[in-house]
Amino acid sequence: MIGESSNPNGGNMKPYTITKIKAFAPLILDLNQLNYDSWREFFQTYCSGFGVHGHLNGTSKPKGDKDGEWTTIDSLFKMWTYGTLTYSLINMVTKPSSTVHSLWLDIEALFHNNKDAHIMQLENELQQMTMGD
């Protein structure tokens, strides 16, 4: 591909060029801000641009137990993800030996579950309201 660096084994070197994700990812995901959908779209687009979207959606799998390149890219991608989360979210989703795909699913579940609870809370508040004159 034009302009794309690669290693001698043919792997994509583009992800290795990013050391400070916050310079490229201005959105920080926070439970208190309703920015999950924006963060998700931005992050998916960003990852597609760097050729690592397969790690995110789970279609990229290691070639074996000792696929060091896959593990390195997956770990790098996890660091990117952690770099765009608040500390409280990091504490909620960090699990030893997880992949970025499982991290992504945990974040998604956290926000979707939270969204449903928030909708129920708002509906309850709406039902409790009385019209005044």
Image (cartoon, helix red, strand yellow):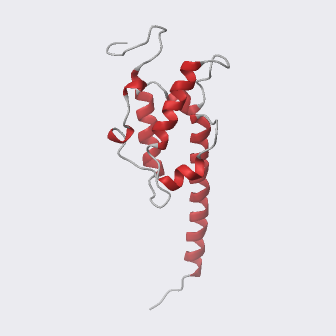
Q: How many discs mark residues in the rendered view?
A: 0
Q: Residue furthest bottom?
A: 133
Residue 74 vs 123, above or below: the answer is above
Q: Image quarter for residue 66?
A: top right
Q: Nearer the viewer, residue 128 or 111?
A: 111
In this picture, residue 26 sits left or right of residue 111: left
Residue at position x 61%, y 18% in the image: 67
Residue at position x 62%, y 38% in the image: 102
Residue 123 vs 83, above or below: the answer is below
Quarter of the picture holding the C terminus: bottom left
Residue at position x 48%, y 50% in the image: 36
Q: Position of residue 108 (x, y in %)?
A: 57, 47
Quarter of the picture holding the N terminus: top left
Residue 71 vs 92, above or below: the answer is above
Q: Position of residue 55 (x, y in %)?
A: 55, 29
Q: Nearer the viewer, residue 124 or 54?
A: 54
Q: Residue furthest right?
A: 65
Q: Position of residue 31 (x, y in %)?
A: 50, 58
Residue at position x 36%, y 42% in the image: 22
Q: Position of residue 127 (x, y in %)?
A: 59, 77
